[in-house]
Amino acid sequence: MKSMPDSAVVSAGQATPCTFMLASPRGQLAASGLRRRLRAGPADTLASRVRAFFAEEDDPSAPGLLTGALPFDRAAHDFLFQPDHVSDAPPAPAAAGPRQDRRWRVSPQPSRAAYEAAVAKALDLIRASRGEAEPLTKIVLSRSVLLEADPPVDLMALSGRLLGDPGAVRFLTPIGPGATGAPRHLIGATPELLVSKTGAAIVSHPLAGSARRSADPAADRAAAETLAHSQKDQREHRWVVEAILDGLAPYCRALVAPPEPELVSTLTMWHLGTRIEGQLKDPQGVSSAELAAVLHPTPAVGGTPRGRSLALIPALEGYDRGFYAGAVGWTDRAGDGEWYVSLRCAEVSGRQVRIYAGAGIVEGSVPAEEAEETSAKLQAMLRALGVDEEGHASAPSCAMLESATGVDE
């Protein structure tokens, strides 16, 4: 093997425990162990680093696969690794045992009131840009909740409680050590496909525009119909679809998307979604990782225009998103792979769990309603943890009882 930069190789003794799992409609992938780590870097260099990684591999027994995650910030470093072992049968999740005896300490970061103030500030910026050549039309703002408890969180048990949502893709990946040196993992159940590649065929399925679901069938249907006919949400969705089409067009000889979005549901949310399909001009010359790096972050998690909105987000939110709203997935030696937007997720490190949720701010947004949308999106992880947003133990809903046993809705 050719020599590689020291930062590209991590010995077993130095490595973050590496267990990767992705359960998607395309199939299930489980990977464990760390054979080599891709030299970390920003999104702009991902394609060249992936090509160099596989070009320097001379061990035919090594899995021809890189798995892991991309951070939200395009300039931040990713965490991708070549595992020792790969299987299409993820480890069986641990049984979902009692949760009510766990004492959680909860710290909203920022508080709901501070989040609403940030939304109001974003609306001021959007209004102030009217009439400019390239006005600011959307900023996605998120908030997080930090939870701490004893004993440390069992990742496999938490993964088991995320089972059962047919509209979500379950994932688990290491993301490297934190500030204290403790291992960190990103775990969640995301509804959004950033991009997949199989040979020449590519697919992206962006979601933008959301409404909270209701246990009352009539109210649930009404929420879906309101979302489907919302001009605000339709406009927000169209921007995302146009950005993805623009990003993929240079790579494709054919690219199609339906004229109108469809309603997509998870256990807790309704979304507007559009399935985009294409055929690559040069399927051997481009990898799924390159396409993911080109598209990420879409206006669904960043805003429009991309550069301007991304520059505003850190100051408005007041914290670092890390790998939330990044992408989790895999790419193989042939360039095939799939990447999902890392939403409805938590960063877990020992006794600490940080969960995230965001909402797209556009003209017509109402701060209190956007805060309520983030609360609705936090429910997927909060219910799996058995706690509410204030830190009180919560009894699982019927949906979550089904999730704990792996029974679909």
Image (cartoon, helix red, strand yellow):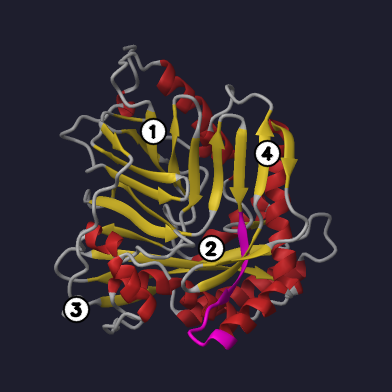
Q: Residue at x 14, y 67 (%)?
A: 151
Q: Which residues are magenta?
A: 206-218
Q: Is residue 39 visible?
A: no
Question: Compared to 222, does 130 lie above or below?
Answer: above
Between disc 2 and disc 1, whose residue precedes? 1
Label 2 or label 1, whichever lies nearer to me, is 1
Q: Residue at x 39, y 76 (%)?
A: 399
Residue that mark 2 sits on = 315
In space, the residues marked 2 and 1 are separated at their CA atoms by 33 Å
Q: Position of residue 99 (x, y in %)?
A: 20, 76
Kindly identify the amino acid type of the residue bearing the numbered disc 4: Gly
In space, the residues marked 1 and 3 are separated at their CA atoms by 38 Å
Label 4 or label 3, whichever lies nearer to me, is 4
Label 4 or label 2, whichever lies nearer to me, is 4
Q: Nearer the viewer, residue 4 or 279?
A: 279
Mark 4, secondary structure of its residue: strand
Numbered tag placed on residue 66 in the rendering:
1
Q: Position of residue 284 (x, y in %)?
A: 57, 22
Q: Residue at x 43, y 16 (%)?
A: 55
**Horizontal side, residue 237 vs residue 329: left or right:** right
Kindly identify the amino acid type of the residue bearing the numbered disc 1: Leu
Residue 356 among magenta residues: no
